[in-house]
Amino acid sequence: MYHKLKVNASRAAKLPPQEFFAKSVDYVQRRIQNKVKKYRYMHHEQLPSVNLPISETCAGMFDFSEKCLPETAALFQQNAKHVLAHEFALFDSGRMKNEFFDRELAVLDARMDRIHLQSARRLFTMLSPGYQPIDWQCDVKSAYRWSEKTWYRDIAIIARAGADIKVPWETTRMQHLPQLAIAFVTEESNDQQLAYQTEFRNQVLDFVATNPVNFGVNWNCAMEVAIRATNLILAYSFFRSSGASFDPDFEHILSKSLFTHGEFILDNLERTQDFANNHYLANLAGLLFISLFFDRGEIAAEWYDFAYLELLTEIQHQFYSDGTNFEASTTYHKLSLELVYYATLFTIKHSPYFRGTNAADVCESVFGEDYTQQLFHIFEATAHLVKSDGTLPQIGDNDSGHFIQLLPLPSTNATLLLAHGALFFQKPEWMNAVKLSDALKLELVLFYGKQSLDELQKSAIHTGNAVQSIIFPESGWAVLRENDNYCFVSAGKNGQDEFGGHGHNDKLSFVLCWDGKDVVRDPGTYVYTTFPEQRNLFRSTSVHNTVMIDMQEQSRIVFGELFQLRDESQARILRYRIGANLDVLVAEHSGYLRLKNPIVHRRTFLFYKKKNRLKILDSFTGTGDHNFEFVLNPGAEFLDILDIRSNLQWHRAPGEFSPGYSEKRQATVFVASIQAQVPCRFYTELMIKK
């Protein structure tokens, strides 16, 4: 708490007097409003002010006519078995079982606040016999649990060392429920279908009973509320589109809950006058889904209009004109695209003119030409960013997050999203950039219809894959490539309008693939608030494939600011040349101009397209004697066969690698250290040992 106050005081001291006064007044007003609202909710149960009818459009807007292969059905049914057993996927790191108390109502007395107890008891009586409630408040990894009685603004994000608030959030995103609905479609047994449908009903009732709005960990973040609402809507719509029906009492409860989700999002929008990021995109996407879920009454129409107009603005603000995202993270680029794309698709699917093959035309008529063109540029950038295996390199933060996850694909896998883009914009060459499994086809047919997919696949046979080397000047990202050989260079901003919430000290760092395999990889992210020192380590200069000078960061990491990295490095691409056999890229950063003896680091990449060969030239201009630390984090397959030729003395050292959020593995890295007088130059050439 002390460090947070210190950080906030430091920020306030830098504001102009007029802005400081305005922000202070706004802060006091919000504090008063929160206290009034808290008092009201703590003393009286607050019920939804209205109850909107569910739109019948949701009951028939998805195409389940495609029959999947037995192995695909088995995949979804195996997932469903895990869901029935309350074994939930956590990020990309596997499943863990979530067990709560037994169904004795006396236990509710201990867990629930007095004013919510009666409602919880009533909803628990609607649960099926034998259903085991879920502990929605628990971080099952650390066994720490938050409380259903705690006002949502009083929830501690960093509750204790090792506890991760993202664990209960991940489960309550409810992304397993649309998967359950798809298993319902692929299942031939009526009894098993009934089990899946009943489980969906039980989990909704269970959550609503034990998570009163504005209380507990699962109402702390509006982004999580929006993602949960979206997945509840999709799951219900999938069940209804495949012929399932639910009792009126349940539908009434679901409708009321989704209405409160919408009210909560609108009351807790994650933006300020100065700043909005992917959280705000999630708020808008969730509001679009919720507003379209209901028959368009006045309130739903107001929510729709607000989200629609704001999305028109945010797609231009949060994505550069070159199509890359402003978060300085490849996986947040993908997540932000998911948020914009699925909200757009769900909206245009409500148009009577939508036919699957005309998605871009309908989008232009609904959202306008500028919006549609920007969405196209984002997909186009994604097609160039992915490696030949359809995955994105880890650059910047990776929290393994998804907006919608019907298939168990890791967050770095952009295969399905690119296939969606190919169908949306009728770009068969993007389809050729991915390998479509039967499971992927099932999702595409679900949203677009079988005929649309069949027609595009026929066109793809006669179309090549157009991805090639490209420079993204606004994000400072560069992709040098030829077929399965790929090199990504990070030479841009820390992102988020200089706030740097998801950026790393990775300037002039790179990722390298040969023959589709990782030769040099980014270290990843590991965790956020769970272990602050690990958070800072994995975004530090010392673990990236670049150079650390005098043990100083490229941009200073301030203790206590886990989601801020002011851009002191000012990295930029100076020049480049893309050729038939050789790509050349020159970039530099100025993060070390603040040293007593200032230095500018310039790095030149020579990417030999027809060979497994990369040459790097590092030049340092300035004055004084300095210590230089070079790092390479190699892929495990290349540890023993990577040939490093250099005027530096490289040696092996222990390191770490995080393939996804909450995962960490021991690794071996190559390091080189040298004390040298500036100006100086070093070269490193990477090849395969013969």
Image: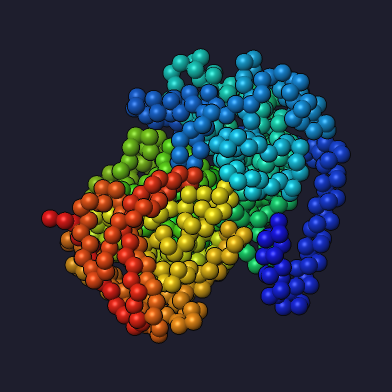
Q: Nearer the viewer, residue 567 or 239?
A: 567
- Left or right, 116 with reference to 666: right
Which residue is depicted at the point 42% across and 43% down?
A: 410
Which residue is depicted at the point 49% across and 57% down?
A: 537
The reply to whether residue 564 is in sight is yes
Q: Position of residue 190 (x, y in %)?
A: 49, 15
Q: Nearer the viewer, residue 516 or 335?
A: 516
Q: Position of residue 218 (x, y in %)?
A: 66, 41
Tag count: 0
Quadrant placement of the C terminus: bottom left
Which residue is depicted at the point 83% across and 31% down?
A: 114
Which residue is depicted at the point 85% across and 50% down?
A: 36
Snapshot quadrant of residue 173: top right
- Left or right, 156 with reference to 590: right
Snapshot quadrant of residue 582: bottom left
Q: Position of residue 262 (x, y in %)?
A: 69, 45
The reply to whether residue 573 is in sight is no
